[in-house]
Amino acid sequence: MIEIKQYKPKYFNATISTLELLIEEDKEKKLFEGQWSDKDYYIHEYLSKKKYTPFIATKDDNEVLGYIIGKKDDLNSKIFHIEMHYVRKNYRKQGLARKLRNYLVEYAKDKGYTELRSYTAADNEAVVRLSKSMDWEVERKDNWYLFKKDLTK
Ligand SMILES: CC(C)(COP(=O)(O)OP(=O)(O)OC[C@H]1O[C@@H](n2cnc3c(N)ncnc32)[C@H](O)[C@@H]1OP(=O)(O)O)[C@@H](O)C(=O)NCCC(=O)NCCS
């Protein structure tokens, strides 16, 4: 059974763990060289710093299939961000990223945030199409898109 929940350290040791997924993602991102720096995605930052809130999708409470990392805005306490998200290759195109995003939306609403934001490289077609398919407000900024979701409606 596939479930989404907030990250806990035990998933570091799952059959396919959060750590493995982060490494897999880093390798995949070599495709987008120049846009991401290695240090940007340093695992301990995401899993230990208070401003980040990681959620994972697990299968049978054992394998980690994907994750989404939420982040409080540095300046505005009412804004929450999608810092990053990732779905393991074999589980893509089955609606898991959309579910992870919807989960984050509900979490952020519940915590009293009024807006969710997501920055996406314009040439990351999968994420751009995913965001557009969710009907969020969109602004183009050079090589980036800013997607916004009003959480008060
Ligand atoms: C982007 C990513 C998270 C999508 O995960 P996913 O679980 O396959 O996405 P979903 O199945 O929920 O797709 C939802 C919608 O997104 C769009 N989409 C997803 N993958 C797509 C692709 N490869 N090409 C075009 N559109 C795509 C489609 O509109 C899709 O809706 P549809 O199935 O009704 O057509 C996944 O491809 C991934 O992990 N990519 C690498 C990491 C990355 O780039 N992360 C973003 C930076 S933080």
Image: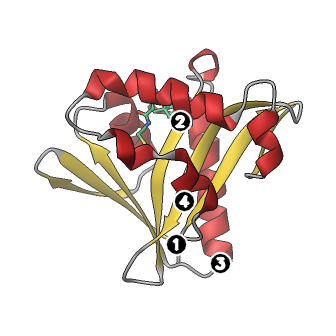
Is label 4's Cβ within 8 Å of ligand 1? Answer: no
- Mark yes or no: residue 95 visible: no
Tell me the CA gap for discs 2 and 1.
Answer: 23 Å
Tell me the CA gap for discs 2 and 3.
Answer: 23 Å
Tell me the CA gap for discs 4 and 1.
Answer: 15 Å
Which dot marks residue 111?
A: 3
Q: Are marks 3 and 4 in contact (CB under 8 Å)?
A: no
**Front in this rendered view, residue 18 or 38:** 38
Tell me: 50 left or right of 140. right
Q: Write the residue at 19% across / 34% down.
A: 34
Q: Nearer the viewer, mark 2 or mark 1?
A: 2
Q: In which quarter of the view is residue 106 placed?
A: bottom right
Tell me the CA gap for discs 3 and 1.
Answer: 11 Å
* Vertical order, 45 against 95 (above or below): below
Q: Earlier in the sequence, mark 3 or mark 1?
A: 3
Q: In which quarter of the view is residue 22 placed?
A: top right
Other-residue count near label 1 (Cα within 10 Å), few / some / many at <14 / 14–19 / ≥20: some
Q: Are marks 3 and 1 in contact (CB under 8 Å)?
A: no
x and y, in percent, of residue 135 in the image: 42, 52
Q: Which residue is mark 4?
A: 70
Which dot marks residue 86?
A: 2
Type of amino acid under label 3: Lys
**Front in this rendered view, residue 69 or 96:** 69
Which dot marks residue 151?
A: 1
Type of amino acid under label 2: Tyr
